[in-house]
Amino acid sequence: MELKMIFKALSNETRVNMLHWLKQPRLHFPAEELEDYDAHLGVCVSDITEKAGLSLSATSDHLSSLQKCGLIEATRVGQWTYYKRNEATIAQLSGLVQNMR
Amino acid sequence: MELKMIFKALSNETRVNMLHWLKQPRLHFPAEELEDYDAHLGVCVSDITEKAGLSLSATSDHLSSLQKCGLIEATRVGQWTYYKRNEATIAQLSGLVQNMR
DNA sequence: TCGTTATTTCGGAAAATCTAGATATGTTTG
DNA sequence: CAAACATATCTAGATTTTCCGAAATAACGA
């Protein structure tokens, strides 16, 4: 886990929002996708794009920077890529920030 | 407290180091300054500059970005500016990151 | 295979940030 | 008051970030 990269990723509001949305997909994304959330797949890029109000490429950039630092992970199913939070990294981060106190 | 600014500040290793040094000044700065630590003043820019191995202006910039987002606070005494951690903000940050889980 | 859909990667423009050096401001001392 | 000192601010160039559209890649279905 690269702490510096994680903080860089979190220094952007859009990316923090994405992380927040992914915490409770049911609250933030269309109900048609419920099966995917239940299957622990996560949320596909199109849905996140619509929610973020950005272009697809910008959204994809944000997602890949979140993924590179380990905050989220991707699962490819057919033509879709689903993203979900990587709770282990997030918990580790939380511990590290605790230790800054 | 501007979370985005805080994360941006923390995405720089030098600034994270500064925060770390200021946590235990005795461990990281000259002993002559002990009175200042004891007086809860913090550490002056010159000492931090030397420790960081940067130019004075670069150090000053880093410190002011840490200050702008509330992670440290400054006390001016005569010609010296002393910086110390703002434990309240750091605790708040810690709580916020906890809540990202 | 061809066309369609989903996503990623690339290239580039505008905006923001970083850093060092020069200059300015405020403080102490002689 | 002048000189020396500590720090802050300004300036400018280099780097980085953010975003978009276009092109590339991947998977699907007819």
Image (cartoon, coloured by chain):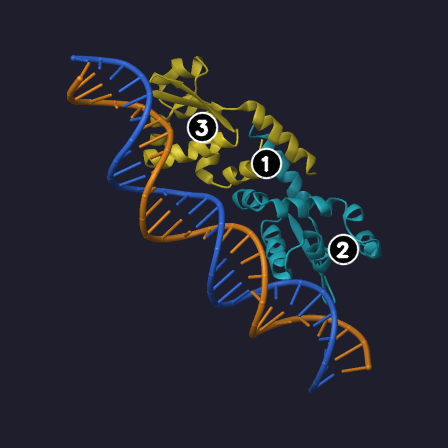
Chain colours: A cyan, B yellow, C blue, D orange
Question: How far separated are the C-alphas under marks 3 and 2?
Answer: 42 Å
Question: How far separated are the C-alphas under marks 2 and 1?
Answer: 29 Å
Q: Are marks 1 and 3 in contact (CB under 8 Å)?
A: no
Residue at image location 57% in from the left, 39% down from the top: B4
User: Chain letter of disc 2?
Assistant: A
Specify the amino acid type for callout 1.
Answer: Leu
The image shows residue C13 at horizontal and vertical percentages of 47, 61
Q: Which label is found at residue B21?
A: 3
Q: Is residue D24 left or right of residue A44?
A: left
Mark 1 = which residue? B3
Q: Nearer the viewer, residue B92 or A3?
A: B92
Q: Which label is found at residue A41?
A: 2
**Image: D30 above or below A90:** below
Tell me the mark number nearer the camera, choosing from 2 and 1: 1
User: Chain letter of disc 1?
Assistant: B
Is the same chain shared between marks 2 and 1? no
Specify the amino acid type for callout 3.
Answer: Trp
User: Chain letter of disc 3?
Assistant: B
The image shows residue B95 at horizontal and vertical percentages of 65, 30
Q: Nearer the viewer, residue A25 or A92?
A: A25
